[in-house]
Image (cartoon, rainbow, N blue to C red):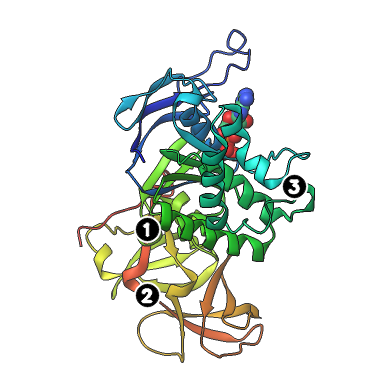
Amino acid sequence: MAQLALKNVYKRYDDGRKKLFRRKKEQGFAVSDLSFTCEDGEFVGILGPSGCGKSTTLRMVAGLEQITGGNIYIGGRRINDLPPKDRNIGLAFEDYALYPPLSVYENLAFNMRARKVPEDEIKKAVDYVAPLLKVDDLLERKPTALSGGQKQRVNIARAIIRRPGLLLLDEPLSHLDGKMRQTLRQEIKRMHHEIKCTTIIVTHDQMEAMSLADKIVIMKDGVLQQIGTPLEVYDDPANEFVAGFIGEPPMNLMPSVILKTETGFQFSFGGSPLRIRVPRQYGPVARDGMKVTLGVRPVDVLITPGGGEQGASAPVAVYENLGDERRVCVRVGDALLNITTTEDAYYERGQIVHLTFHEERTHLFDPETGERIRTSK
Ligand code: ADP
């Protein structure tokens, strides 16, 4: 096991256009000034949309890509120039890359055999790793006789067979269907509890990162957005991007203008008479005419019987009953506001409902920069 640290890491792929285009410093970097640590035994998720630099980061840690700037340390040792084979890393990619003519046993044994490890040691290693990933019944099969989920289990088993200091998983579940994904997700979590190997998973799926990782590193356009535990990034997003990326259905992000009225500050929404009281904690930062993006999660909008000085009324646009929860979408001027509730209620399209926001759980963002507007609460 080992601690991993990235310090101010940059990556620019040489796309051969350097002479044609004079680019600003930030442009052209697949990864820009990235720093984070993954403690010994910790499970870290690198999360972000496609193209944000997740795989590039993982490949730099594995030594499969040269880094353009900065330093990478494993167990305190700078490894920028260390060849991949000397980094004591286990790798499992999205595509399984198993050898088709070889049995599962032989696939697991392959690298050890190439390194002339004695047969009894290989058998011991396979006997250890196969039950851990529940592939012990599949050892005689060829990869063509395995399901996608089974292939990925073998792939991960192969990555950990040499008990690496660091396990790197690149989108290991994205080929699998919904149910299989969930099963394997739980298996990976269980395996990590057992072997406690320092692990990094790259994923674009926030659910995957939230459920597996101790700590999530969120990236966009090669730039770090936030590092935190799943709860921290959910409850306390650093900016509008993180707020919208974490959570399903995503946080409502509504353009709004704050108005000063006789009864205090209120949010107003373009094209809508709806007014919502600005929560007390924003008193010190609110100004008349201030443009903000109001963020509130669908679970934090409450439909109430009506009346009262707080909240306001709006018409229902869509009602969906998903069995264990109901999703209600209401029209607020030009925008739609999503609400989820576990209450057993039915709403007609066009029905006027009364809304209140969970005030402690509303967030304000600067529409220009996307940054969170903090309060001195
Ligand atoms: P992610 O894993 O988040 O989908 P990648 O790390 O694969 O993103 O890619 C980050 C950026 O680097 C993208 O703009 C991608 O087009 C670019 N990129 C990735 N690999 C290469 C490469 N071999 N050559 C040039 N550009 C690349």
The 10 Å Cα crowd at callout 3, few under 14, some 14 to 19, many 20 or more, is: many
Under tag 2, what secondary structure?
loop
Measure how far apart labels 3 and 2 are at the Cα level: 52 Å
Query: Does 347 sit left or right of 341 as displayed?
Result: right
Which is more toward the observer, 50 or 311? Answer: 50
* Mark-to-mark CA distance, 1 and 2: 13 Å
**In terms of secondary structure, where does tag 1 sit?**
strand
Which dot marks residue 358? Answer: 2
Report the residue at 69% width, 55% height from top: 138
Residue that numbered label 1 is attached to: 364
Task: Determine whether, in the image, residue 332 is placed left or right of residue 7.
Answer: right
Instruction: Give me the C-alpha separation between circle 1 and circle 3.
Output: 51 Å
Instruction: Give percent across and percent down for residue 327.
Output: 59, 77
Three-letter code for the amino acid on which mark 2 is drawn: His
- Residue type, mark 1 in image: Leu
Residue with the mark numbered 3? 143
Pointers 3 and 2 in contact (CB under 8 A)? no
Tell me which numbered mark, 3 or 2, is placed earlier along the sequence: 3
Residue 347: % across, % down: 61, 87
Judge the density around disc 1: few (<14), some (14-19), many (≥20) Cα neighbours within 10 Å.
many
Res 28 → quadrant: top right
- Residue at 68% x, 47% y is 104
Name the residue rendered at 66%, 59% in the picture.
Answer: 137
